[in-house]
Image (spheres, coloured by chain):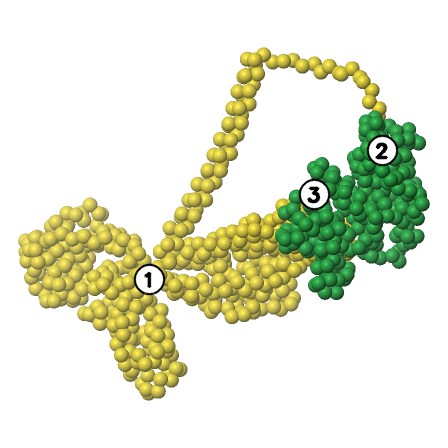
Chain colours: A green, B yellow
């Protein structure tokens, strides 16, 4: 198992990215999350660089999704959830009471585990974000945004003739790419992806992974995944979470080839999880 | 989380039943299943049977109410009666005595009726609505004055029922011997030297009849016996073998003898006491029928007129309009309040003890007996706010109280059934909570909300008790024109009619029930259609 992963890393990382040199886009300092009495995330410290892909791996319930949802404050919608510590994007505290959460979510897009297009037309799905944020002054600008977003998401060729068809009529992989197009239509800086391929077949997964690879030159992408192969394939840095703590974080090839922590070693070699 | 360490598999002690045992067990399991299915099917069929019986009964009762009988007669529109001044002033035309014209037409159609009682009897064959119809026709076209027109005159409810029913079951047999009439009209005596009535006395002797001067006195609880002679008809009241006393129903052409086959015994098989139409009226109706002027029409009046004390004139228009206005008030109050309350409770309200108490109480309100809402309406809307009694406005307010919990519960369920992923998608894009709800959740919940609303409205449509409390049970003839006019609603109209003794009202009650059921079916059908059309799957 570990050999396969190592081989893949060797094969796919032809030009290892020097992530350490980049400035941190998202920074977390001593982040704790509580669901009522439950201490779900403990003392997480991490720097996430811009223009790259960071993957969070770990067994179910380890807190990786919880942490992801802290970055665009989706946890605000859960009333029992309490977040302490500091999370900054471009050195700005996102839990600052003066900061508008709606503005934050326009900067931090999110793609969910299950494709969740609105039951509206493909066009309206992509146009919804720009509309509510007033990003387009007229119809032609909106058309441009929709077209560009769909092109960036690699979906334009497949849907350009049926933009008025319902978004829910697409296949699972197309729906997920539509959700990515919808997220990038508001021109975010950070894109959060919560297990974006777990509901998709291998071919659709491959397309999404290619897309993520294309997008990383423009965005800071954070992806939660259960698939270690996927983390190895798409990300430059990887963080391993276990039982609510961030165990280890580093360049992907290092995490998969010579992790410092025994728990990481056990997890990536399939001994638990 | 734990390392996988090979452990010896625990042994589960299994007692394998023999093939015979398992076959028996299997058989009994299937038998239980079969019994359950048979019971379920049985109860379903029983329910269906009762439903079918109920519907068939109501429909069969209602069918006669959807038709009416009228007699087409020549009516002379006498200018001296309608418009003595010749000015064609609508006020004068409207005030004229049209009843005298219709009566005259009837007298012409059935000549030879004499005596106050008989004339009154003849007039009662016709509905008072005939004169009203004639007035409407003349007012619509005053140029008809002075002409003689063919006009369908509505018959009274009893006459109508007579034609819808089996009539008098008349039968006749030829007489033998000679009888002689003492007079041609009024109370007369028929005498026979050769005991011509002996055949009849034998027939009636099985009834326990009183004797008077050697004659048997006939009763109304037995079939009526009549004698047809000299072109007239005599109803016998006392008979002996040699003579008979009776009342002339149709005048004879002459008094005097009739021999052998020139006269007949006529029997009305249905006893007069069991009929709404007496023998005198029956002869009039039979005459009308024989002259071919009676026609059966669809009873449009039932749908176009308000309530009336005369069954043949009574309609459901007033009740339908009242129902419509009441439901309009209910709908326009319930939908916004109910839906917004549901949205607030489901999406925005903090989950604390207060909202919990509110939720529980909304559910409790849905179970409160409807009469309580009526009392509340009486105390609050009528007594405190002084709103008009019997008005659709108040009815609508009361029904809104009744339906609101239903709509809130349905709307909450519909909102809850929208997958959270849709909310997350919107919120993740930077939509505010309110935008997420109104742009995405509400449109998706709308079919469910509409279904709940329609079912709630159907519930309100059939509601009677609370409306009784606020005075919508009054006898109201006029069709309401506004929200504050006195009105009644369809179920209350049914309740009112069901109390009336006339057979024709019983049929109208059934007909009104059919209309109500049709509306209910329509609304429930609409709810199902909406649900199927707009239901989305994720």
Label 2 sits on a secondary structure element that is helix
- Please state the chain letter of the residue tagged with numbered disc 1 in the rendered image: B
Residue A97 is left or right of residue B341, and the answer is right
Letter of the chain that mark 3 sits on in the rendering = A
State the quadrant of the C terminus of chain B. Answer: top right
Residue at (64, 67) in percent of width and height: B385
Q: Position of residue A2 (x, y in %)?
A: 84, 28
Q: Chain of mark 2?
A: A
| B350 or A61, nearer to the observer | A61
Q: Dot 3 lies on which element? A: helix
Q: Which residue is mark 2?
A: A10
Q: In this rendering, is residue B4 above or below A17? A: above
Q: Nearer the viewer, residue B344 or B532?
A: B532
Q: CA distance from mark 1 to mark 3?
A: 67 Å
Considering only vertical position in the picture, is B381 above or below A194? below
User: Which residue position is annotated with label 1?
Assistant: B297
Quadrant of res A41? top right
- At x 14%, y 59%, the residue is B228
Residue identifier under label 3: A173
Disc 1 to disc 2, C-alpha distance: 94 Å
Cα gap from disc 2 to disc 3, whole angstroms: 28 Å
């Amino acid at each position: 198992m570990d050999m396969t992963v190592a081989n893949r890393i060797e094969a796919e990382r032809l030009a290892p990215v020097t992530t350490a040199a980049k400035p941190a886009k998202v920074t977390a300092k001593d982040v704790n999350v509580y669901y009522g009495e439950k201490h779900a995330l403990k003392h997480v410290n991490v720097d996430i660089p811009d223009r790259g892909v960071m993957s969070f791996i770990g067994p179910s319930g380890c807190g990786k999704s919880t942490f992801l949802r802290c970055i665009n404050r989706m946890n605000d919608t859960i009333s029992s959830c309490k977040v302490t510590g500091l999370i900054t994007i471009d050195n700005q505290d996102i839990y600052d009471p003066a900061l508008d959460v709606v503005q934050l979510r326009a900067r931090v897009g999110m793609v969910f585990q299950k494709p969740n297009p609105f039951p509206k037309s493909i066009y309206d799905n992509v146009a919804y974000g720009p509309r509510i944020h007033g990003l387009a002054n007229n119809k032609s600008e909106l058309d441009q945004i929709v077209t560009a977003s769909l092109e960036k998401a690699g979906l334009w060729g497949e849907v350009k003739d049926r933009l008025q068809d319902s978004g829910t009529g697409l296949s699972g992989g197309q729906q997920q790419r539509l959700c990515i197009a919808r997220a990038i239509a508001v021109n975010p800086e950070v894109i959060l992806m919560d297990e974006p391929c777990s509901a998709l077949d291998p071919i659709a997964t491959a397309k999404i992974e290619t897309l993520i690879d294309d997008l990383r030159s423009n965005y800071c992408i954070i992806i939660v995944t259960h698939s270690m192969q996927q983390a190895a394939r798409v990300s430059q840095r990887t963080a391993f979470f276990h039982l609510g703590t961030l165990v280890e974080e580093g360049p992907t090839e290092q995490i998969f080839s010579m992790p410092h922590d025994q728990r990481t070693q056990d997890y990536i070699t399939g001994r638990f999880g | 989380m734990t390392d996988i360490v090979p452990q010896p598999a625990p042994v589960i002690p299994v007692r394998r039943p023999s093939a015979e045992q398992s076959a028996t067990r299997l058989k009994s399991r299937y038998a239980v299943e079969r019994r359950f299915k048979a019971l379920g099917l049985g109860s379903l069929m029983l329910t269906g049977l009762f439903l079918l019986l109920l519907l068939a009964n109501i429909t069969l009762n209602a069918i006669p109410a959807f038709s009416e009988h009228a007699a087409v007669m020549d009516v002379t529109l006498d200018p001296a009666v309608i418009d003595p001044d010749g000015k064609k002033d609508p006020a004068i035309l409207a005030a004229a005595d049209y009843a005298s014209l219709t009566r005259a037409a009837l007298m012409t159609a059935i000549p030879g009726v004499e005596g106050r009682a008989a004339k009154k009897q003849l007039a009662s064959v016709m509905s008072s609505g005939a004169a009203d119809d004639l007035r409407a026709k003349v007012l619509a076209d005053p140029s008809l004055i002075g002409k003689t027109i063919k006009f369908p005159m509505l018959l009274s409810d009893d006459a109508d029922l007579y034609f819808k029913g089996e009539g008098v079951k008349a039968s006749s047999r030829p007489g033998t011997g000679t009888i002689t009439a003492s007079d041609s009209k009024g109370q007369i005596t028929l005498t026979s030297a050769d005991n011509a009535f002996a055949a009849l006395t034998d027939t009636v002797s099985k009834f326990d009849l009183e004797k008077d001067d050697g004659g048997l006195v006939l009763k109304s609880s037995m079939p009526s016996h009549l004698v047809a002679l000299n072109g007239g008809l005599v109803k016998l009241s006392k008979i002996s073998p040699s003579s008979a006393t009776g009342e002339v129903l149709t005048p004879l052409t002459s008094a005097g003898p009739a021999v052998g086959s020139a006269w007949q015994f006529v029997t009305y098989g249905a006893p007069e006491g069991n009929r709404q139409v007496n023998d005198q009226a029956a002869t009039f109706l039979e005459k009308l029928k024989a002259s071919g002027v009676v026609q059966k029409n669809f009873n449009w009046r039932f749908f176009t007129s308000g309530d009336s004390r005369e069954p043949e004139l009574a309609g459901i228009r007033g009740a339908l309009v009242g129902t419509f206005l009441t439901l309009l008030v209910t709908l326009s109050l319930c939908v916004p309040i109910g839906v917004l309350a549901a949205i607030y409770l489901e999406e925005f309200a903090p989950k604390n003890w207060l909202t919990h108490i509110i939720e529980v109480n909304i559910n409790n309100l849905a179970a409160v007996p409807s009469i309580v809402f009526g009392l509340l309406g009486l105390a609050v809307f009528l007594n405190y706010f002084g709103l008009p009694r019997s008005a659709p406005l108040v009815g609508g307010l009361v029904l809104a109280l009744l339906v609101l919990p239903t709509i809130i519960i349905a709307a909450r369920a519909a909102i809850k059934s929208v997958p959270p992923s849709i909310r997350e998608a919107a919120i993740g894009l930077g939509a505010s909570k309110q935008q997420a709800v109104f742009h995405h959740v509400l449109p998706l919940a709308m079919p469910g909300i509409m279904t709940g609303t329609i079912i709630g409205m159907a519930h309100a449509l059939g509601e009677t008790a609370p409306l009784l409390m606020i005075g919508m049970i009054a006898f109201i003839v006029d069709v309401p024109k506004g929200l504050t006019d006195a009105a009644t609603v369809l179920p209350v109209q049914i309740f009112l009619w069901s109390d009336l003794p006339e057979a024709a009202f019983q049929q109208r009650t059934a007909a009104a029930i059919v209309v109500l059921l049709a509306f209910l079916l329509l609304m429930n059908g609409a709810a199902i259609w909406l649900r199927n059309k707009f239901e989305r799957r994720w």
